[in-house]
Amino acid sequence: MDCFLEWSPEALDDVELIASYIERGSLWYAKIVVSKIVSAAETIRLNRDIGRIVPEVADKNIRELFVYSYRLIYRIEPERVVIAAVIHASRLLQPFVSRIEGGK
């Protein structure tokens, strides 16, 4: 099912920070990683249930896809899918939970 995809401002900031960090070592690799993240998000737009349920949150509407060593976390809403965060898999999720849940 094709649905409306929206990036939260924080998720866009996450991607910019990831790109800036990787660029220090390789501009080429930074472009590849960002391209793969965007591509994964487009896949979600076409199939909202493709990602696994985020274990720390245990809500069927909060899911994630792994892109290299990053967690692309998204929230399924009735009319759209919101990319809520893109964080390194080694980071604790707790500081991001409020943002991921949409400020519940």
Image (cartoon, rainbow, N blue to C red):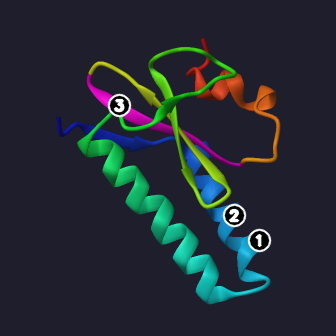
Q: Mark 1 to mark 3: distance in Å?
A: 30 Å
Identify residue type, mark 1.
Tyr
Q: Confirm whether the magenta stretch covers residue 69.
A: no
Q: Which residue is mark 3?
A: 49
Q: Looking at the image, which residue sits at the far left?
A: 1
Judged by its main secondary structure, the magenta piece is: strand
First reached walking from the N terminus: tag 3 or tag 2: 2
The residue mark sitting in front, 3 or 2, is 3
**CB under 8 Å between discs 1 and 3:** no
First reached walking from the N terminus: tag 1 or tag 3: 1
Residue 95's x, y, as percent? Answer: 80, 30
**Callout 1 secondary element:** helix
Q: Quadrant of residue 26?
A: bottom right
Q: Residue at x 49, y 32 (%)?
A: 52
Q: Confirm whether the magenta stretch covers residue 80.
A: yes
Q: Residue at x 64, y 28 (%)?
A: 99
**CB under 8 Å between discs 1 and 2:** yes
Label of residue 18 in the image? 2
Question: In the image, which residues are magenta?
Answer: 79-88
Identify residue type, mark 2.
Ile
> Callout 1: 10 Å neighbours few (<14), some, many (20+)?
few
Residue 34's x, y, as percent? Answer: 54, 68
Q: Which residue is mark 1?
A: 21
Q: Residue at x 62, y 77 (%)?
A: 30
Position of 84 with respect to 26 (left or right) is left
Residue 10's x, y, as percent? Answer: 62, 44
